[in-house]
Image: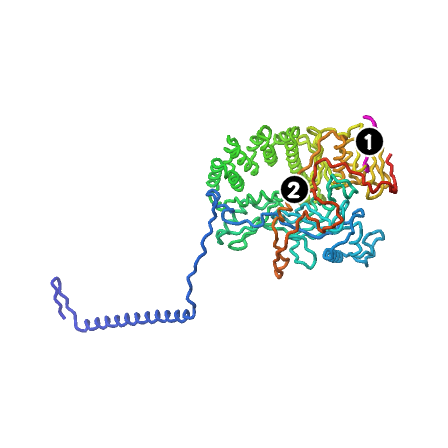
């Protein structure tokens, strides 16, 4: 074949052209077959997918819940308190029905059956039975629970307390005790009692979870007259200082306004970053439970500062990416907006040491509000640069700011100049300043003593030396404080009943505590009983006399419980030694060893000495906080009682007024109730006219020559 082209010519044979045409035809057939095969495969897959999904329900459109946005100031947005609710930030009301022994014939009255049945059951569980065959002189030997309840030296009581929010296991708290079937709780000791959430509930009624136990000696009004029933002071109520122990820790709940796993993880991480684990902490501070719930446990270092921790928790910044940016914004707001200065102070303190560079300018701010707010954050972060400004306020500031400055100053570790400043304030003529300075000094002395014990244990090569836990070290540090030249405050325990603190500075003063750990604090140097002297207490059951300034001090004491009279012709003249003598238990052979008074009786005796001018010193006590906390915890009309097990049901129980009598007895002549703390001059006891003309049996007399 010959083919012509304008530019060239091509010649090929006929057979060659036929073969080429055949190959092209085969290629077209193959391409068409592949296309059909791919189409069939795609169609099969679509058919298979349709068969799989034909029974699947068609998804419905979801409507998302609207976001909750709180109406809060802009600087507080992005904090935990701005996006979540903190549940469990209030004290928890706990109660129990207890049994008191050691009374002086003032108990054993009629008791309602529900209380009797409850206590009988508890006694039986603890082994009290008529079948007991113990020591012959034991009051429990062959005694039934019912007979024990009728004993005039015993009483059933209602025990109530307010446990601080987020209390850890092992923390202690004060108890409020009301008698059910006794006219006086003087000399009583509470047996171990279960404390449950809510008002007191006897067996058979809804039982809430047990979260604490209670026990210890009962502390009555120290200004009451021992042995008297109707002198205008209530004796069927009392308290047990530090007698409650938390057995089931309570946790704080952080509930997000808008549920989100990512935000919950951010909040958990922020809390643990701001409150990292330290010695004494068994687990992280925060644990995420769900997309909207985070459980928080109060760290060990905040055991006695629960409200401070909750404030810090609420002001933690969630976004930890740019701490300096947030700190700068908080510091600017603190200075420019007085209404938010307190919140900004907490926000800065919650950020930790990263906020310190931005606080420095607030320490010397001319306005008092931002200056004190910045100093509060600086003291909370242990910034030594805040000490100078706080010292200036404590020494020369307005009276309404000085006590706050003293408390903040005592938080800053180290710096002996702080101790010298606090020690100089012990010479102040303002009572509140002196007491606040003492409280700050004794806390610093305890902290210093704790570090000394830790260093001694760490440097000891004796493998037989005891291995003490942090809690045991803290107890040792609180129990004994030697006097040192820096702080000058010393402490010792008296008869295992209370602490006696000696503060040898300033004018003579007696300060007694009515909360937490019982303490008698003696201010001044070389405190002595004034002579000549004639002091009488408790209707002449305690007489202390000295005819001249050089005579020995004579003492006569009639113990209404043992029915024994003790006479001491050489009573200690030193006030610290006299306190020891009042509290120490007497021995059978040596009545100079002590009178065996309780803490409240020692306080009452000292007050009567002060009242009769036997002590040239002032006398003061702290305000009553226990009853106020208890009333705040029970301020609602009803309280929710949650059961111990998941099978139980939640119940609403009416709240029981802690101040109301358990049983309204018509024969009770007292028409009013007073608080337990009455730091005023009590009225002179009047002789009961019904006792005139009656023959009274003289008790035995023991003479300590």
Point out residue 551 in the picture as x, y percentages from the top left corner. Answer: 83, 27
Q: Quadrant of the C terminus?
A: top right
From the viewer's perspective, tell me whether residue 217 is left or right of residue 458: right
Point 87% across, 38% down: residue: 702
Q: CA distance from mark 1 to mark 2?
A: 37 Å
Q: Earlier in the sequence, mark 1 or mark 2?
A: 1
The residue tagged 2 is 625
Point out residue 681 in the picture as x, y percentages from the top left corner. Answer: 72, 35
Q: Which residues are magenta?
A: 540-551
Labelled disc at residue 183: none
As for residue 17 lying within the magenta part, the answer is: no
Asked which secondary structure carries label 1, the reply is strand
Q: Is residue 125 visible?
A: no
Does the CB distance between marks 1 and 2 fall below 8 Å? no
Q: Quadrant of the N terminus?
A: bottom left
The residue tagged 1 is 545
Question: Which image quadrant is residue 29 in?
Answer: bottom left
Callout 2 crowding tier (Cα within 10 Å): few <14, some 14–19, many ≥20? few
Residue toward you, 385 or 57: 57
Asked which secondary structure carries label 2, the reply is loop
């Amino acid at each position: 074949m010959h083919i012509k082209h304008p530019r060239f010519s091509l010649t090929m044979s006929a057979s060659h052209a036929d073969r080429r045409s055949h190959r092209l035809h085969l290629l077209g057939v193959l391409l068409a077959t592949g296309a059909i095969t791919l189409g069939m495969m795609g169609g099969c897959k679509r058919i298979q997918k349709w068969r799989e999904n034909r029974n699947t329900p068609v998804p419905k459109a979801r409507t998302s819940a609207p976001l909750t946005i709180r109406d809060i100031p802009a600087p507080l947005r992005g904090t935990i308190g701005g996006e979540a609710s903190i549940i469990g930030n209030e004290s928890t009301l706990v109660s129990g029905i207890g049994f008191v022994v050691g009374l002086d014939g003032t108990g054993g009255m009629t008791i309602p059956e529900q209380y009797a049945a409850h206590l009988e059951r508890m006694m039986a569980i603890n082994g009290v039975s008529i079948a007991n065959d113990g020591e012959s002189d034991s009051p429990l030997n062959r005694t039934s629970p019912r007979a024990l309840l009728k004993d005039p030296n015993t009483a059933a009581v209602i025990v109530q307390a307010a446990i601080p929010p987020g209390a850890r296991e092992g923390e202690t708290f004060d108890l409020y005790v009301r008698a059910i079937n006794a006219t006086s709780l003087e000399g009583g000791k509470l047996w171990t009692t279960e404390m449950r959430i809510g008002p007191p509930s006897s067996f058979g009624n809804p039982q809430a979870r047990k979260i604490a136990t209670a026990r210890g000696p009962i502390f009555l009004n120290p200004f009451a007259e021992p042995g008297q029933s109707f002198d205008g002071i209530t004796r069927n109520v009392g308290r047990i200082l530090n007698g409650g122990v938390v057995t089931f820790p309570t946790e704080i709940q952080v509930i997000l306004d808008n549920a989100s796993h990512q935000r919950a993880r951010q909040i958990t991480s922020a809390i643990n970053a701001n409150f990292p684990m330290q010695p004494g902490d068994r687990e992280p501070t925060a644990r995420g439970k769900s997309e909207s719930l985070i459980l928080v446990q109060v760290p060990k270092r905040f055991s006695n500062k629960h409200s401070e921790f909750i404030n810090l928790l609420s002001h933690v910044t969630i976004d930890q990416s740019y701490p300096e940016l947030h700190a700068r914004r908080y510091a600017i707001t603190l200075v420019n907006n007085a209404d938010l200065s307190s919140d900004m102070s907490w926000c800065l303190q919650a950020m930790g040491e990263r906020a310190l560079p931005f606080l420095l300018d607030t320490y010397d701010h001319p306005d008092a509000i931002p200056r004190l707010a910045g100093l509060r954050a600086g003291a909370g972060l242990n910034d030594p640069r805040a000490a100078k400004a706080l010292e200036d306020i404590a020494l020369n500031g307005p009276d309404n700011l000085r006590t706050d400055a003293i408390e903040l100053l005592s938080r800053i570790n180290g710096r002996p100049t702080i101790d010298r400043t606090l020690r100089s304030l012990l010479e102040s003529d303002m009572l509140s300043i002196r007491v606040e300075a003492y409280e700050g000094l004794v806390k610093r002395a305890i902290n210093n003593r704790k570090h000394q014990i830790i260093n001694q244990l760490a440097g000891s090569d004796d493998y037989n030396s005891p291995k003490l836990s942090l809690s045991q070290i803290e107890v040792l540090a609180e129990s004994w404080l030697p006097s040192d030249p820096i702080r000058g405050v010393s402490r010792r325990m008296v008869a295992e009943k209370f602490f006696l603190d000696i503060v040898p500075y300033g004018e003579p003063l007696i300060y007694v505590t009515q909360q937490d750990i019982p303490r008698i604090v003696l201010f001044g140097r070389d405190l002595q009983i004034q002579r000549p002297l004639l002091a009488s207490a408790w209707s002449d059951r305690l007489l202390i006399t000295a005819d001249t300034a050089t005579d020995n001090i004579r003492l006569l004491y009639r113990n209404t419980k043992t029915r024994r009279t003790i006479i001491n012709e050489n009573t200690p003249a030193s006030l610290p030694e006299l306190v020891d003598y009042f509290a120490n238990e007497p021995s059978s052979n040596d009545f100079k060893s002590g009178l065996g008074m309780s803490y409240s009786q020692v306080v009452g005796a000292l007050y009567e000495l002060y009242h009769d001018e036997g002590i040239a010193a002032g006398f003061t006590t702290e305000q009553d906080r226990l009853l106020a906390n208890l009333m705040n915890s029970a301020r609602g009309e009803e309280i929710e009682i949650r059961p111990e097990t998941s099978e139980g049901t939640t119940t609403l129980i009416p709240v029981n007024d802690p101040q109301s009598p358990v049983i309204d007895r018509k024969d009770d002549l007292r028409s009013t109730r007073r608080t337990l703390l009455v730091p005023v001059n009590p009225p002179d006891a009047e002789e009961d006219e019904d006792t005139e003309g009656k023959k009274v049996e003289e008790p035995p007399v023991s003479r300590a020559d």
